[in-house]
Image (cartoon, helix red, strand yellow):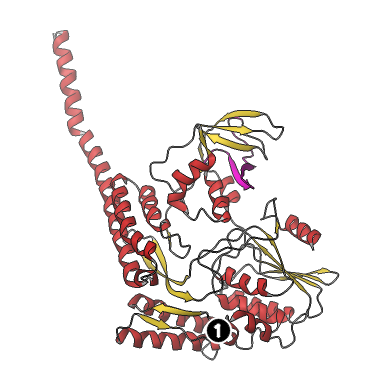
Amino acid sequence: MICNADVFLLRRLCLTLFMLVVLPPLVLADEVNTKHWRDLTVNDLSVIRQLIITSHPGAIESDNESFIEWVERGYLQASQLSKGVSSRKDSQAVLNFYIAGFKDGHVGMNQPDKGKSSWAGFILDMRGQSFVVKQVAKSWPIPLPPIDSKVLSCDSKSVREILESEISPYIDRRLNLKSTWLHLAKQLTVDDANYPVLARVLSKSCLVELPNGARQSFTLLWQEDRGQLEAFLRQPQPVQALHDLGDGRYWIHVSDFMPSAAENAALDVMLESIKSINDAKWVVLDTRGNRGGNSLVGAEILSALLGSKLVKSLDVPSRAYAMWRVSPFALSTLNKAVATMEGDYGRNSEAYKFVFSLTRSMELALHEKKDWLRQPNTSLVEQEGSRGVNAQGFKGKLALVTDSFCASACLDFADVVLAVPGGVHLGLPTSADTLYIDIGAQTLPSGAEFWLPLKVWRGRTRGNNQNYDPQFVFNGDINDTAAVQKWVLDQL
């Protein structure tokens, strides 16, 4: 017979053995996984920093002290944050922190296998200075604030304070832009897999002003997205096409400046149709869904509409020119661009000849160990050849519709449209870009794709990170084409 004391000791011995035998492998596996992601984060940061130093124009511009300073200060801060990394999500947050500090939409990253987002069942929009509930889940286990309610604070912190101090450093630090606040507003109630925040503390409750003026506190319940959230956050891209609205009014969806070879064939058809509407009274150029790409596409559309002579005069500011940072990475990127141009436009196209010539010049500049290569001042209209040429051009009025994602080549397009006398700008404030453009991409040790710009504009009329604010601001759902069309036509 074994006494109670012996039984107790035996149980303790068994428990101890269990902990020694079973728990160490689990703990060890967790430690190995944590070290794996920390090491990858450190390696990714090192590659990003080195690429920027060797290939980004800003790294050798003495008058851009803030950029040069962030290369090192930001790297040190991100390296310190990497000590808290234990997963892919954490790693992405740290890399985004470093990238956001450059305040440049052309410096970015795409992480594979992001995982799933979670949210609190409703999405905010920003109207004026207020943060308003724009969309709510179809069903949720607890009450949600109704649409058009104003969210005043969460966990006793103002919405603006949370977005500015806790979320913005990992997503977008250009707080001078209205488009940035429009995007940040959505993140208050979303733990977004695309834009994770390191060690984020999710809000537990929010104080809300209801549409009737009463105030009420709502407890937040965070749940993993089951398909609704993606639809709310996704930016739809209308099919690029021309639509006759009758009475001399035409609507052109200018939504895709990165067409595939098949889409280029459809673009050819659309360009021919545009050339035939010279008698139009109004043409609305709708850029919703356009996030940039190849500025040549925009030049072709405008040439088909306005006539090449006018577009050329608007497209080439007298003092503007581009300088490429000479580097092996730039040469590699241009070689890839040559292959793309050959496939999309053919070797006899002006676009292909332009890029091919630029590539050979980059090769020579690299051999001669130069820092800069000046891009020939050939206009986009001259590069396009005859595809978008319209000798006449329509003489009616133009309207431009933008959303808050319009950047890069979309902004180049807006530059020309808004330079046409009598044009009207409607929709939402655009995004903005720096003077650094034309990106190249490289895969990081973690498998993420990192991209950065390779050339800089000198003397561009639109300033660094300068956006466009519309004359008429749309307060509804900018993705609702029917509602946007009705509203725009009412304003014209």
Q: Which residues are magenta?
A: 116-143
Secondary structure type for disc 1: helix
Determine which quarter of the picture holds residue 416.
Answer: bottom right
Q: Tell me where residue 30 sits by quadrant.
A: top left
Query: Residue at the right extreme?
Result: 247
Q: Residues within 10 Å of mark 1 (few under 14, many from 20)?
A: some
Q: Is residue 112 visible?
A: no
Quickly name the residue at label 1.
345
Q: Is residue 215 visible?
A: yes
Point 31% across, 44% down: residue: 84
Query: Which sits in the foreground, 210 or 259?
Result: 210
| Residue 492 vertical position relative to residue 162 in the rendered view, above or below | below
| Residue 332 place in picture, x, y as percent | 37, 78
Is residue 168 placed above or below 398 in the rendered structure?
A: above
- The spot of residue 432 in percent (x, y) is 54, 63
Q: Residue at x 43, y 50 (%)?
A: 169
Q: Which residue is at a point 72% across and 88% down the rendered structure image? A: 391
Q: Amino acid at mark 1?
A: Tyr
> Was residue 288 drawn as part of the magenta stretch in this picture?
no
- Where is residue 256 shown, x and y percent of the image? 60, 69
Give the camera-side residue of 162 and 25: 162
